[in-house]
Image (cartoon, helix red, strand yellow):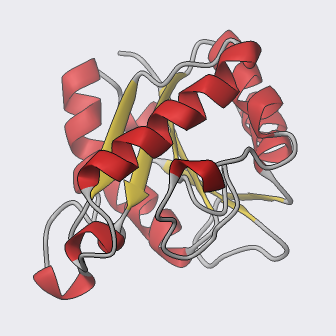
Amino acid sequence: MNRAVFVDRDGTVIPDRGYLATAEGVELLPGAGEGLAALAAAGFALILVTNQSGVGRGYFGVEEVVRQHARLAELLAPFGVRWAAVRVCPHRPEEDCDCRKPRPGMLVSAAAELGVGLADSYMIGDKESDIAAGLAAGCRAVSVGPAPLPGAHLHAADLHAAAEAILREA
């Protein structure tokens, strides 16, 4: 069984700008490229999982999210980082879908597609919904940001430090 690191986008890999409506607003947070590269070098599949309710709210279309992810791929390329899979929930919270974090749908579907063992995998994020999705999927959860989030197994200041913590543990 393969192992993976599921990674939230906004606030974890790129700055959280609310409803990011253009690819021009995509930039890496400090250390994000290095952290993802270290995880990939250690054999983890990298899977991006992101709630994008701006689509469901009509603020921007799914084609703009595709452009944002193309820009993100450009920024990660110099680090040798490629996503094994990208999952996007375009729904509004009130739509009660199975894919929107804190539900584990995006993680479970990507794991099934890629043959990933969830118990051997991690979820990194900056919000309680990220941690809850990881736990619901059966992963170890890692919070990033100024303070640990409830339920997280590990905590780090940023994605680079989170990668180091995962590599120490794994």
The quarter of the displayed image where residue 125 is located: bottom right
The quarter of the displayed image where residue 15 is located: bottom right
Using the image, determine if residue 146 lies above or below residue 130.
below
| Residue 127 visible | yes
Using the image, determine if residue 62 lies above or below residue 39.
below
Depth check, front residue: 56 or 36: 56
Which x, y percent locates residue 55?
27, 67
Q: Residue at x 25, y 80 (%)?
A: 57
Depth check, front residue: 15 or 103: 15
Q: Residue at x 76, y 21 (%)?
A: 38
Which x, y percent locates residue 109?
20, 40
Answer with left or right where residue 4 lies relative to residue 156.
Answer: left
Which x, y percent locates residue 137?
33, 52
Answer with left or right where residue 29 lies relative to residue 23.
Answer: right
Q: Residue at x 82, y 28 (%)?
A: 34
Which x, y percent locates residue 48?
46, 41
Depth check, front residue: 61 or 147: 61
The quarter of the image holding the C terminus is: top right
The quarter of the image holding the N terminus is: top left
The quarter of the displayed image where residue 43 is located: top right
Depth check, front residue: 6 or 21: 21
Residue lying at the far bottom in this picture: please name it: 94
Using the image, determine if residue 85 lies above or below residue 156.
above
Q: Residue at x 13, y 70 (%)?
A: 97
Answer with left or right where residue 120 lies relative to residue 33.
Answer: left
| Residue 42 visible | no
